[in-house]
Image (cartoon, grey):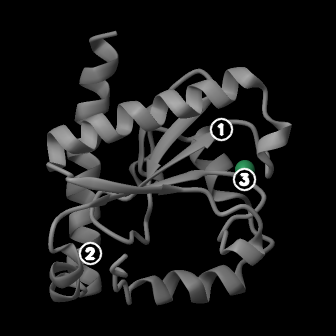
Amino acid sequence: MDRLWAPWRMNYIRQANEVEDEECFICKAIEHTSDRNNLVVAEFSHVIILLNKYPYNNGHIMIAPKKHLSNIKDMDNEIKLELMNCISISTNILEQVLNAEGFNIGINMGRVAGAGVPDHLHIHIVPRWNGDTNYMPIISDTKIISQSIEEAYTILKKAFMEYKDGI
Ligand SMILES: [Zn+2]
């Protein structure tokens, strides 16, 4: 697999080391879903979907259970089912609104596995496009990245809301 080059993630890596004991940002997002800064694009019974502030690619989203859990084994089947359904809904929306051509989907369980927030399990969905490994370095300027997050937030929030209206 070609690796994505995401130098702006250095800000995140530095912060992650400094603010280890701070409040869980996923729980904070669950408490304040309407605060734009938390980048929550959808809320379901047991699960929320939010954008990653330090994305590996445009439209990088995270799906998390509302319960602060670190291990899949501690989850009820109902939550597991909703997580899987949310993967399906999210990839479908990312295909439709961002024309994603493929996805990297995964969980980093435990800090040793690379989890930035090891205590609150979440599933990453990173959309991929043909040639994106060449494209991303060109837009690696931090300011452009934050603009593209704002834009992705607006587009995806609208798409998820329309999806929920259609249920
Ligand atoms: Zn949490």
Estimate the spatial distance between the alpha carbons at disc 2 and disc 3, rounded to whole Å: 25 Å
Q: Name the spot of residue 93 as percent of width and height, x first.
A: 26, 36
Amino acid carrying label 1: it is: Pro
Left-right relation of 146 to 21? left
Regarding mark 2 in the picture, which secondary structure is present there? Answer: helix
Question: Quadrant location of the N terminus?
Answer: bottom left
**What is the residue that sits farthest to the top in this orientation?**
167
| Mark 1 or 2: the one toward you | 1
- 61 lies above or below 114: above
* Residue 10: image location, x then y, percent: 48, 89
- Disc 1 to disc 2, C-alpha distance: 27 Å
Residue extending furthest toward the front: 1
Q: Nearer the viewer, residue 64 or 3?
A: 3
The spot of residue 103 in percent (x, y) is 35, 55
Is the residue under label 2 in contact with that under label 1 (CB below 8 Å)? no
Q: Amino acid at mark 2?
A: Ile
Query: Which residue is tagged 3?
Result: 120
Which of the numbered marks, if any, corresponds to residue 82?
none
60 to 20, vertically: above or below: above
Q: CA distance from mark 1 to mark 3?
A: 8 Å
Q: Amino acid at mark 3?
A: His
Q: Is residue 155 above or below residue 114?
A: above
At 70% from the left and 86% from the top, the residue drawn is: 18
Which residue carries the number 1 mark? Answer: 65
